[in-house]
Image: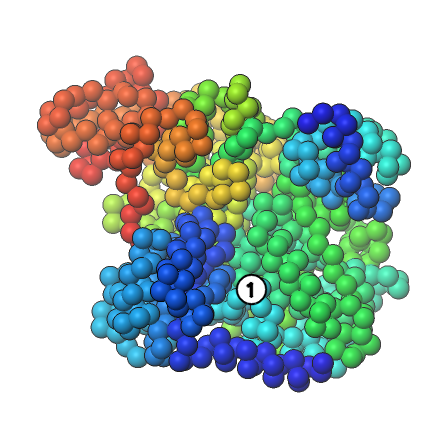
C-alpha cells in the first residue's frame, strides 16, 4: 500500500471517531484492520489528531501484542500456545512450521506468502492443539495436518504425503 | 410494546421453534464447533435440504456450544415426531444420510447418535441427562447455551430472559443488592469477592457519574468459559450488566472483551442492537425511568488487562498497567469515577438470581461457596469441554465421571486450576471438594475456571516453566518483584529442564516466589509463583530427578531424554517412520526399526504413533 493510500485509509478511520483519548485503541485497531499494520506515518497522524505525543502513541502500540509495524504474510498462521494446547503438543506444531516454512515465529516468508505467530489461547481448548490460518480455526491439529494446511495454501509440502493422513478418531 | 406483549410474542415464536410437527436441525456453531468444521456441516445441510426441496419445511438453526466440545461437530435432529437426537462427530459427508434416514424416513442413524435429548427412548442410545458427562452437571449459567439461537432475542425472552431485570427495576436498588447478598454470590473472575458487598460499596460511593464494567478479557490460556457463554447466550450477561448498573446507580456500562474472540464480539454487538430495539437498553428501560447504555471495548492482547485497574487504563486509551489499590475502583475507577467491575459469569448469575430468587440460588453449592461454577475442562482427559457443576463436587467426579478420565494407557497426575495464576492439585487430593476454600487450602485457587488435566506424560517442571514463560512475557514491567521475579524463576526452571539444575535451585525458587507473593503490585505477580511453588510442594521428586539424576521421568524435557525402539515389540510396520518429521527412523518393513540418535529431535511423534508400545523413552 502506497503512502497516499495509507493516509486516505487513516483519514477514513479518524472520520468515525471523536478526538478523545479513550478512542486511541479503537482507532489503532481499525487502522490496522484497514492497512494490515501500523506504519509510522499513520501513528504520527493519529497522534496529531488526538493531540497526543507520538511517543505516547508509540508506547501504547508497543504495549499490546495485537499491534504490528510490518504487514503479515498473505496467509497469517497463528499457533495457540495456551495451556491446553501446550500439553497436547502445540510446540511440535510450531517446530514443524518453522522447519517447513524456513522462518521463525514473528517472521514472514521471503515471498510474502506466510507469516507465523504464537497466540495465547483462542478459547477452543477442548479441541487442542489449535492452529488458525487467516480467519479459519483448525482443531486437533497434528504435525501431518500442519503440512497439509500449508500445502493447501500453496506452501512447501508434498501433497501425496498429506493424502494418507488419518482423520481424527471418532469421539 | 409492553413487557407482557414482548414475552407473549416471544412465547409463540419459541413454540414455533420447538413445534413437534416441524422437522428441525440444530448445529452447534460456537468457536469450538467451527474449529471442528461446523460451518461446512451447515452448508452441507443447506445444500441437501434445497436439493430435496425441503428448505421451506425444515427449521435449520445455528446454536451455541452445549459444552460437549469433545464430540464436535454436534447436530441435533428432530423429524416430525417428538424425539430429538443429538449426533456427534458429524461431517459434511454424513449429512445426506441424516436427512434421508432420519428426517425423511424417521429412522435415526444410531451409530453416530450420542444421546436422546427429548422424546421416546431409542434402543442403544442413552438419554442426554444420563450421559456420564452430563449427569452431575447443573446448568444455571449455561442454561441457554446450545439451546437457543444466540441471534434471536425472543428465544432468550421466552425462556425467562429479562424477567430478572424487570423485577429488579421494580425494586429499590438497595433491595437488589440485598438479594444478591442473600444469594451468597461471589465473584467468578478469580478472587471470589462477595458481589453484594462490591455493589453496595459502589452504590454508596459519592458521585453522580458511575460506571459498571463486564470483564470479558478471559486471559487464562486454557480457559474458554466466558467465550462460550458470550457466544451461546450474550443476553444473560448483558441483562446482568444492566441490573448491576441499576443497583449501583450507573447509566453507562462497558464490556471489555478479548480481541481473540471475534465471534463473541459479533454476538455481543448483535445482542446490544436487539436489546435497544426492544426497549431493554437506552432511555426509560421497560418504562421504569432508568436510562442505561452499553459500549463494547475490544482488548488488544495483553493478559494483565484482565486485572481491573489495568483494564480501566486500557479503556481510557493507555498502556494497560495496573496501579496500586486503594483507592479501589468502587471509589475511584474508570475516568476517576466510582466503578463496579464484574466477570461475565458473575453477571449472568446475577440475572438468574433476580429472576428466580436468592433462596433458589443458595440452594446449590456449599455453606460458603454458593451456586454453580463453570469450568473449562481441557488437557489430557477423554471428554474435554465446558461444564457447570454445583460448588463442592469432588474433583474426582469432574475428572473421572464428567471428563471420562485420562484413558486406559495413562495415569492421572494433577489438575492445574486457573492456569498461570493457579496451582496444581495432585492426584492424592482427588476427593477434594471443588470450592473456594478447599482449593485455597491445597495452595491453588478456583480462579475463573480453567482446569487443565495432566497425566504421567506431563512433566511438572516443564509445566511450571511453561507458565513462567507466559507470565514473564505478560508481566507489564511496572513493579520490580514481578518483572525480575518472573525472569529469574523462568531462568532457573529453564536451567533445570535443560540438565543444568543445581542443589541450591529449589531454595532459590521458593525464596523468589515468596517475595513475589508478598511484594508484587498486582495479582499477576502475586500469583505467578503459584505453579512453581505447588509443583515443588507436590512433585519435589520430579524436580530432584531433573537436578540430581539429569533425568525427566515424564519423558518430556528434550535435553534429558532419549527415544529407542524395543526390538521385541516392534513389528516393523513403518508407522513411526511415517510420523517422524525428520526421517530419523530406519529399518525395512517387517524388520524391527531403529532411531538415528544423531538426527533425532526428540519430539516423541514415533512414540505417540506406535500402537505396540515399542517406542520407549528414557
Ligand atoms: C493478571 C490478572 C488477570 C485477570 N484476568 C481476569 C479475567 O480475565 N477475567 C476476569 O473476570 N477477571 C480477571 N481478573 C480479576 C479482576 O481483576 C477482577 O477481580 C474481576 O474482574 C472481578 O470480577 P468478579 O468480582 O465478578 O469476580 C484478573 C486479575 C489479574 C490480577
Ligand atoms: S489453550 Fe489453545 S485454544 Fe485454549
Q: Is residue B513 left or right of residue B109?
A: right
Closer to the camera in the image, B210 or B427 = B210
Residue in the image at 49% along x and 79% along y: B16
Judging by the rendered image, the residue that carries numbered circle 1 is: B150
Q: Residue B237's spot in the image, x, y percent?
A: 63, 64
- Residue B469 rendering spot, x and y as whole percentages: 54, 33
Determine the image quadrant of residue B253.
bottom right
Work out which quarter of the rendered image holds the N terminus of chain B and state it: bottom right
Mark 1 residue crowding within 10 angstroms, few (<14) / some (14–19) / many (20+): many
Closer-to-camera residue (B272/B543) = B272
Query: In the rendering, at what x and y percent does residue B84 appear?
Result: 36, 73
Q: Which residue shows up at 65% across the image and 51% down it? A: B257
Residue lying at the far top in this picture: please name it: B598
Compared with A134, B279 (above or below) is: below
* Chain ID of residue with mark 1: B
Q: Could you tell me residue B422's position as x and y percent?
A: 53, 47
Amino acid at each position: 500500500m502506497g503512502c497516499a493510500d495509507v493516509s486516505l485509509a487513516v483519514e477514513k478511520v479518524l472520520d468515525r471517531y471523536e478526538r478523545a483519548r479513550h478512542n486511541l485503541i479503537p482507532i489503532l485497531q481499525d487502522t490496522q484492520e484497514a492497512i494490515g499494520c501500523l506504519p509510522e506515518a499513520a501513528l504520527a497522524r493519529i497522534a496529531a489528531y488526538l493531540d497526543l505525543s507520538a511517543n505516547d502513541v508509540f508506547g501504547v502500540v508497543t504495549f499490546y501484542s495485537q499491534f504490528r509495524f510490518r504487514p503479515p504474510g498473505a496467509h497469517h498462521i497463528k499457533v495457540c500456545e495456551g495451556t491446553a494446547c501446550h500439553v497436547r503438543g502445540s510446540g511440535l506444531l510450531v517446530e514443524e512450521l518453522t522447519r517447513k516454512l524456513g522462518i521463525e515465529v514473528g517472521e514472514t516468508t521471503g515471498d510474502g506468502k506466510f507469516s507465523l505467530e504464537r497466540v495465547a489461547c483462542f478459547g477452543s481448548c477442548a479441541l487442542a492443539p489449535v492452529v488458525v490460518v487467516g480467519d479459519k480455526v483448525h482443531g486437533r491439529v497434528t504435525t501431518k495436518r500442519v503440512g497439509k494446511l500449508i500445502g493447501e495454501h500453496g506452501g512447501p509440502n508434498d501433497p501425496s504425503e498429506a493424502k494418507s493422513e488419518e482423520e481424527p478418531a471418532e469421539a | 410494546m409492553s413487557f407482557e406483549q414482548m414475552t407473549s410474542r416471544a412465547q409463540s415464536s419459541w413454540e414455533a421453534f420447538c413445534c413437534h410437527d416441524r422437522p428441525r436441525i440444530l448445529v452447534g456453531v460456537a468457536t469450538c464447533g467451527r474449529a471442528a468444521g461446523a460451518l461446512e456441516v451447515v452448508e452441507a445441510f443447506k445444500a441437501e435440504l434445497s436439493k430435496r426441496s425441503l428448505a421451506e419445511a425444515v427449521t435449520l438453526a445455528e446454536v451455541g456450544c452445549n459444552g460437549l466440545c469433545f464430540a464436535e461437530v454436534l447436530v441435533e435432529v428432530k423429524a416430525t415426531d417428538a424425539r430429538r437426537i443429538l449426533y456427534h462427530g458429524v461431517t459434511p459427508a454424513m449429512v445426506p444420510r441424516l436427512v434421508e434416514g432420519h428426517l425423511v424416513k424417521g429412522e435415526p442413524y444410531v451409530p453416530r447418535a450420542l444421546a436422546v435429548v427429548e422424546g421416546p427412548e431409542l434402543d442403544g442410545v442413552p438419554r442426554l441427562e444420563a450421559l456420564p458427562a452430563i449427569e452431575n452437571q447443573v446448568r444455571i449459567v449455561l442454561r441457554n447455551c446450545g439451546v437457543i439461537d444466540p441471534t434471536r432475542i425472543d428465544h432468550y425472552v421466552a425462556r425467562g430472559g429479562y424477567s430478572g431485570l424487570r423485577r429488579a427495576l421494580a425494586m429499590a436498588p438497595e433491595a437488589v443488592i440485598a438479594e444478591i447478598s442473600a444469594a451468597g454470590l461471589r465473584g467468578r473472575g478469580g478472587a471470589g469477592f462477595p458481589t453484594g458487598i462490591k455493589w453496595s460499596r459502589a452504590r454508596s460511593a459519592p458521585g453522580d457519574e458511575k460506571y459498571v464494567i463486564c470483564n470479558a478479557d478471559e486471559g487464562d490460556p486454557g480457559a474458554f468459559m466466558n467465550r462460550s457463554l458470550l457466544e451461546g447466550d450474550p443476553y444473560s450477561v448483558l441483562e446482568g450488566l444492566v441490573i448491576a448498573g441499576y443497583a449501583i446507580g450507573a447509566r453507562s456500562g462497558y464490556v471489555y472483551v478479548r480481541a481473540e474472540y471475534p465471534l463473541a464480539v459479533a454476538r455481543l454487538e448483535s445482542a446490544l442492537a436487539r436489546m435497544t430495539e426492544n426497549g431493554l437498553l437506552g432511555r426509560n428501560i421497560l418504562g421504569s425511568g432508568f436510562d442505561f447504555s452499553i459500549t463494547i471495548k475490544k482488548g488488544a492482547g495483553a493478559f494483565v488487562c484482565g486485572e481491573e485497574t489495568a483494564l480501566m487504563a486500557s479503556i481510557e486509551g493507555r498502556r494497560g498497567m495496573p496501579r496500586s489499590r486503594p483507592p479501589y475502583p468502587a471509589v475511584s475507577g474508570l475516568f476517576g469515577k466510582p466503578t463496579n467491575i464484574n466477570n461475565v459469569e458473575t453477571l449472568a448469575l446475577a440475572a438468574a438470581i433476580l429472576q428466580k430468587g436468592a433462596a433458589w440460588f443458595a440452594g446449590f453449592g456449599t455453606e460458603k461457596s454458593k451456586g454453580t461454577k463453570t469450568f473449562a475442562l481441557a488437557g489430557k482427559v477423554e471428554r474435554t469441554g465446558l461444564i457447570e457443576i454445583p460448588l463442592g463436587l469432588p474433583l474426582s467426579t469432574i475428572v473421572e465421571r464428567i471428563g471420562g478420565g485420562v484413558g486406559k494407557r495413562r495415569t492421572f497426575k494433577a489438575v492445574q486450576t486457573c492456569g498461570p495464576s493457579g496451582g496444581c492439585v495432585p492426584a492424592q487430593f482427588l476427593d477434594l471438594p471443588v470450592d473456594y476454600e478447599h482449593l485455597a487450602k491445597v495452595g491453588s485457587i478456583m480462579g475463573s475456571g480453567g482446569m487443565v488435566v495432566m497425566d504421567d506424560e506431563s512433566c511438572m517442571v516443564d509445566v511450571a516453566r511453561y507458565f513462567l514463560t507466559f507470565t514473564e512475557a505478560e508481566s507489564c514491567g511496572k513493579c520490580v518483584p514481578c518483572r525480575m521475579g518472573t525472569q529469574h524463576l523462568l531462568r532457573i526452571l529453564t536451567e533445570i529442564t535443560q540438565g543444568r539444575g543445581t542443589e541450591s535451585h529449589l531454595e532459590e525458587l521458593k525464596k523468589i516466589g515468596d517475595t513475589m507473593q508478598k511484594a508484587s503490585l498486582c495479582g499477576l505477580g502475586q500469583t505467578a509463583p503459584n505453579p512453581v511453588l505447588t509443583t515443588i510442594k507436590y512433585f519435589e521428586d520430579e524436580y530432584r530427578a531433573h537436578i540430581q539424576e539429569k533425568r525427566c521421568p515424564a519423558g518430556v524435557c528434550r535435553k534429558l531424554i532419549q527415544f529407542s525402539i524395543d526390538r521385541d515389540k516392534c513389528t516393523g510396520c513403518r508407522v513411526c517412520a511415517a510420523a517422524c518429521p525428520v526421517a530419523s527412523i530406519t529399518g525395512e518393513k517387517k524388520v524391527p526399526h531403529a532411531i538415528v540418535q544423531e538426527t533425532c529431535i526428540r519430539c516423541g511423534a514415533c512414540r505417540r504413533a506406535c500402537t505396540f508400545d515399542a517406542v520407549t523413552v528414557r
